[in-house]
Amino acid sequence: MKGTYDVIEDAPYFRAVERAASEVSRLFNFKEIRTPLFEASELFHRSVGETTDIVSKETYDFTDRGGRRVTLRPEGTAGVVRAYIENKLHADPRVPGKYYYLGTMYRYDRPQKGRTREFRQFGVESFGTKSPAVDAETLAAAHTFFRALKLQDALTLHINTLGGRESKANYAAALRAHLEPHVETLCADCQRRYQDNPLRILDCKIDGDSEAVQNAPRTLDHLAADDRKNFEEVLSHLDALQIDYVVDHALVRGLDYYTHTVYEFKVDAALLGSQNAIGGGGRYDELVETLGGPPTPATGFGIGLERLIHVLKQRGFTPREGHVHLYLLAIGEEARRRTFTLAHELRLGGLVVETDLLGRSVKAQFKQSEHHQAAFVGILGETELAAGTINLKDQATQEEQTLKQSELLKTIKTRLNGRSKAPDCSDCTEKGSQK
């Protein structure tokens, strides 16, 4: 179906990215949370916003057999907030309450490079405090995630602030006044947004580059004193962590629930085109209360995995997993029976092992080892069977040695130990610059 795809060759990429996400979340003490793929439609209408493109154009809505209006989740935050309220997680004395998720989202959007209608997302949410340090810690988690994938130098953090309710209202009024002479030149959607939520005009793919939008007033010029101080503290914390950023005055994000800090992670346009954000987030201090919970400030981000993996491929990243550690090649029927049991023993020891089950010739077995990109080939014939040994060939160095079958597991693990591995966040805790 258009906008969806089967994950086959890309599965190792997803595992590598998801492993890095889980490991970074562990380092920052974010607890995993899994919410349903579908929720009551009202949840997304109230949280994301009735007038947003996501709700008005992109959600998959349906009526179930019980007559209830249901929506496939288009983003992760609303479901996590609903779970936070229903499970009374606000009663947990550990503040902030920190959660992460990895899951599938659905939006009826135009499929394009790295963007599909069914897509996967990594996100974190932090509840319970307005502290600017929590915004910075959340951004530090994202930065560490990108660093684990060797992407810290390939993207730029764009950051801005909308301020609180008063500042946001003041800015909306100033923006309306600025755009009033130009309303008729805007697209139909932005003419509607002018009344409903003028900030979203800044996020428009059609009018975003127009002169009227480019010359729009800046949010920073309409902030209350406390809001300005809050944003300056966020930036000060990022400076202390040596996390680079660009203050982007046009950045507002596309969801209605954002207040105060908002941000996006952008890569070079050559990697993704003009729509080059691979994730983003911000603070949403009023959303928990809007959905029926106690007043609870919160902040978080979401990162699209398909877009991220597209960038990783463009950068030449190749996940190491998916390759076979050892191919056991049998010469003769007795050797074939032994390789069958030996393969099982080595798998229990943690090695990825393939062996011939179809009675192939020696030449065909060597060909299979190449197809599997096996790191080692173990050759077992009558001589080796009689001596309890095996001939081991290292495909990288072409070195061969004969060793006892009982030493095979330890030998291969020792050889593999010094070679590069898939991202497991070993870089996350290196000494030195965080940039």
Image (spheres, rainbow, N blue to C red):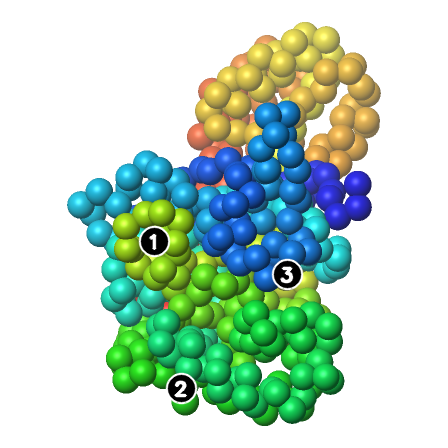
Nearer to us in this view, 86 or 34: 86
**Label 2 element class:** helix
Marks 3 and 1, the one that precedes in the sequence: 3
Nearer to us in this view, 107 or 408: 107
**Label 1 element class:** helix
At x 52%, y 56%, the residue is: 48
Q: Amino acid at mark 2?
A: His
Question: Residue beneath label 1, please?
Answer: 289
Give x and y (percent) for residue 227.
31, 78
* The C terminus sits in image quarter: bottom left
Nearer to us in this view, 38 or 332: 38
Q: Quadrant of residue 262?
A: bottom left
| Rendered position, 256 above or below 123 | below
Label 2 to label 1, Cα distance in Å? 25 Å
Q: Is 47 displayed left or right of 84 in the figure?
A: right
Question: Residue beneath label 2, please?
Answer: 222
At x 53%, y 23%, the residue is: 347
Give x and y (percent) for residue 297.
30, 59
